[in-house]
Amino acid sequence: MGKKVLVVDDEEDIRFLVRMLLSKNGYEVDEAENGEVALNKLSQKKYDLVVLDIMMPKLDGWGVMRELKKRNLSVNVLMLTAKSDDDSTWEGYKQGATLYVPKPFDNKKLLDMVNFLIGDISEEERQRIERELQGM
């Protein structure tokens, strides 16, 4: 069975795209349309990675990050958002995000980052991605 990823975004098209991309590459993918649904899923199942949007109704990405800390739920978080200013990026890292990807995103780069965070890559591939991340 593949590594487990939870994709949290209020945009159904984005969830579908990310799910298809990751599923085709061997990941087991669940979806949540907002932060409340995500926290419910995270309390019931262990995930290797959460791909998390920031701007969502009910409970946004920042709220999810705060709740993860409060509940001592440890998981890698890849922030995926249309809000790509420096303040948002810094806030994401302060809240515990591991990496940050602006929308629109390149499918290959997103997959590279997921592989990098979950550790599903060779050492050579890890070094290539690290070089790319340093150039961002």
Image (tube, grey):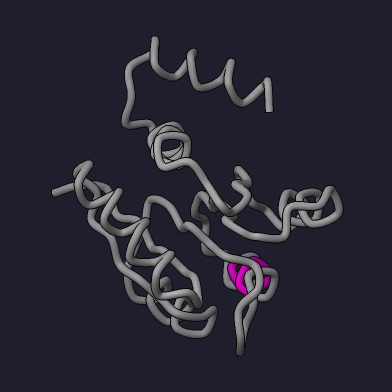
Side of 54 relative to 52 (left or right): right
Name the residue rendered at 38%, 63% in the picture.
Answer: 6
69 horizontally vs 124: left or right? right
Q: Which residue is drawn at 29% across and 55% down?
A: 4
The structure residue drawn at horizontal position 51% and vertical position 80%, both measured from the top left corner, is: 34
Image quarter (top left, top right, bottom left or bottom right) of the C terminus: top right
Give the image location of residue 100, x and y in percent.
Answer: 63, 46
Q: Position of residue 112 (x, y in %)?
A: 42, 33
Does the magenta portion include 67?
Answer: yes
Q: Note whether 102 is above or below 116 in the view shown.
A: below
Q: Main secondary structure of the magenta part?
A: helix
Write down the region rendered in magenta. Answer: 64-68
Magenta stretch containing residue 63, yes or no?
no
Q: In this view, does 93 lie above or below 125?
A: below
Is 82 situated above or below 105? below
Choose between 16 and 34: the one closer to the eye: 16
75 sits left or right of 84 in the view? left
Total number of numbered discs in the rendering: 0
Residue 11 location (% of width, % of height):
48, 74
Vertical side of 53 occupied by 5: above or below: above
- How far from the left and from the top, in percent, is residue 68? 59, 68
